[in-house]
Structures are given as C-alpha cells and as structure tokens.
Amino acid sequence: MKDLIEKLKQDFTNRLDKANSASDLETLRVDFFGRKGKLNQIFKQLTRLSVEEKQKWGPYLNQLKARWQKALANKHQKLTQTAPVADFNFPAFPVPTFGRLHPIEWMRQKTLEIFTPLGFIEVDGPHIENDWYNFEGLNIPPGHPARDLWDTLYVDLKDDKNSPLLLRTHTSNIQLRALQKYKPPLKVMSFGRCFRHEVLDPRHSHTFSQFEVLVVDKNINMSHLKWLSDYFLKQILGEVTQSRFRPKYYPFVEPGVGVDAKCVFCAGQGCSVCSNSGWFEIAGAGMVHPQVLTNAGLDPDEYSGFAWGFGPDRMLMLMTGVDDIRQLYQGNLNFLKG
Ligand code: PHE
C-alpha cells in the first residue's frame, strides 16, 4: 500500500508541475478524483485490507485528497489569473495639459474678436523701425521735446535713407504705413510688441504690447472715437464700466485724450487696485493730426480720422490678477502653467 501511494504521490506532483493550462488540470482532476479515478481505485483496494490497515491508510488518503484538491485549485487560479480589472471608481490622475495659449496671445484673440466684427482688418508693422515711421512722420521731429515721452532704444544702424533705426516705441508706426498702403476709407488694427528703455519694475518692462486702431474716412469725428472706446471697454470689462476722456497730449493727434475706465472692482468708489482714484488709465487716443494725414499723402481737408491705442498687458493684469508685467515676457513655464 505504501509503495502504491508513494507512486501515486510522485505521479500527481509530476503532472501538476507539468500542467500549464486549465484543461491539463481538468484531465488531472478526472484522472485522480473522478469516479473511476486513481484515488477511488486505491480507496477500493483499502476495503480489502485489515481493519488496522484501514485505520492507518484511510485518514491518510483523505488528507492527501484534500491537499491535492487544494493544490489543484491553487494552480488553476494561477493559470487563469488575468490582468486586474480596471477600477473605474478610482480617482483620476490629473491629465497633463498639452499647452495652451500664452496670456498675451489670449488677450490678442479676445481683442481681435471684439474689433473684427466691426470691420477692422489686422495689419502689422516692423519691430525695428526707422525714425520717420516711429517719430518724424508722426509729427515728432528730431529734437522735439515730446520725444522724451518715449524712452527709445536705438539700433546702431541707419536705413538706406540714412534714417536712424530703433526698436519701435509704440504701434503708432502702423498709422503711416497703413495709410500709405491702403488709402482711406480704412479701418485697421494692430497688436504687437513695443520696446522702451524703461526702469524695470512690476509695472514696467522693456518689452511690452500695444494694440492700436486707426479709422480714416470722410467726416470721421470725435463721437465715433468716443463710441468705439466705450464699446470696447464694455465688451472687455463688462457693462458695469464706463469710460471717460481727459485731455492729453500726443503729437500725432489733435485733440488728444487719455481714456480711463471706471474701476470694475470698486465701481468708481476708489480702492487699492485703482490707487483710490476710481478710474484706470487704459488707452491713449485722439483725432489724427492734419500733419500726419499730410505726411501720409492725404488731404486733411478731405479726410479725417482717429487713432486709439491701449496696453493689453495692463488690461491682462487687471483681468487675471497677474501682478508683475515681466512675467508675461519671461517664458517661465511655472508661471505659464499656473
Ligand atoms: N502711441 C501712444 C503711446 O505710445 C498711444 C496712442 C495711440 C495715443 C493712438 C494716441 C493715439 O502711448
């Protein structure tokens, strides 16, 4: 009996080791535990033994049976185990974003969205500009004290007409360029980088953005300018705002105005954002100076127009709470992702 069982044990262990599919295991199970299986055959043989022998081998075989059944079940589980099923209730990991618009580009698109339906087309001007388009043609001749309003960065080169080259100090260079190129009636807008020799602080950067519109046609007057200015500020800051004009000097417009928007944080009551004045200076504007029209080859008795320009960086800071203009020009990914 002992030998028989010993052989059976070896047989079972071998076949269990070799089994590598659920069907191998099933064959093994039937061979050993089936009605005509090897274990039952041994149990049958047990009936022929003495009572003593029965008492010795009976419980032993039962234990063996239980142990093998367990081994079979374990191996079955191992072989049929598949990848864990996805847990759809598990909290999702944050999905990395694949980039987004730079805040300035976001502001540009928002601004163009407001002006495009009004019929403005976008034009561009060079960043490195000659003195004539940036200053002289805009009624700011060399030596004119108004040049001090723009802390200019000059390039150590001249253009082919011997005019000094500089980094444009404003987008107003597009005024003359657009007038020469398109002729009135004209409604153009331009959004772009400008450069000044600033003392850097959270509100001043050597590189900054301006947006400017120019409208020139017959019979354009100040009320057109007022309407457009108001319209834009309400679109961008909401209906709660109001705009006001203050007289302001720019050599290329006459009359010139500073455009203020009523503070949207305190409804004009005065707060820390607006330095207690109730208003922000948002834009510079005015009726195009007759000399500028003449410089562009137009007859100021026939045509009139207005120009209006604002600082998108400041507007962006107001709208988003960014508190340092330099962040907008540093390409710092931590800031841009935030
Ligand atoms: N170019 C002016 C500046 O740089 C702003 C301005 C634009 C003023 C258009 C009047 C008209 O500050």
Image (spheres, rainbow, N blue to C red):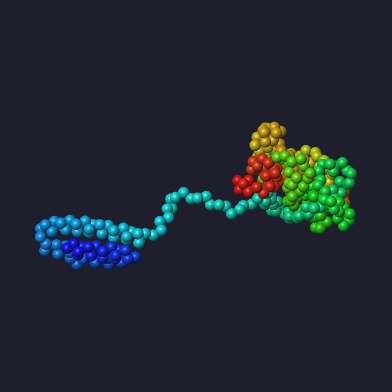
Asked whether, in this view, residue 54 is left or right of residue 254, the answer is left
Asked whether, in this view, residue 312 is left or right of residue 149, the answer is left
| Rendering coords of residue 284 (x, y %) | 77, 43
Q: Is residue 192 visible?
A: yes
| Rendering coords of residue 159 (x, y %) | 86, 55
Residue situated in front as seen by the camera: 269 or 67: 67
Residue situated in front as seen by the camera: 289 or 206: 206
Q: Is residue 218 visible?
A: no
Q: Which residue is drawn at 87% across and 41% down?
A: 145
The quadrant of the rendering that contains the N terminus is bottom left
| Rendering coords of residue 279 (x, y %) | 71, 36
Q: Residue at x 44, y 50 (%)?
A: 90
- Which residue ends up furthest to the front in the rendered image? 3
Q: Residue at x 64, y 52 (%)?
A: 101
Residue situated in front as seen by the camera: 214 or 271: 271
| Rendering coords of residue 21 (x, y %) | 34, 65
Query: Residue 28 sits in which quadrant?
Result: bottom left
Asked whether, in this view, residue 246 is left or right of residue 69, the answer is right
- Which residue ends up furthest to the left in the rendered image? 50
Q: Residue at x 74, y 47 (%)?
A: 207
Position above or below: 85 against 28: above
Count how many numbered circles sit on residues in the image. Answer: 0
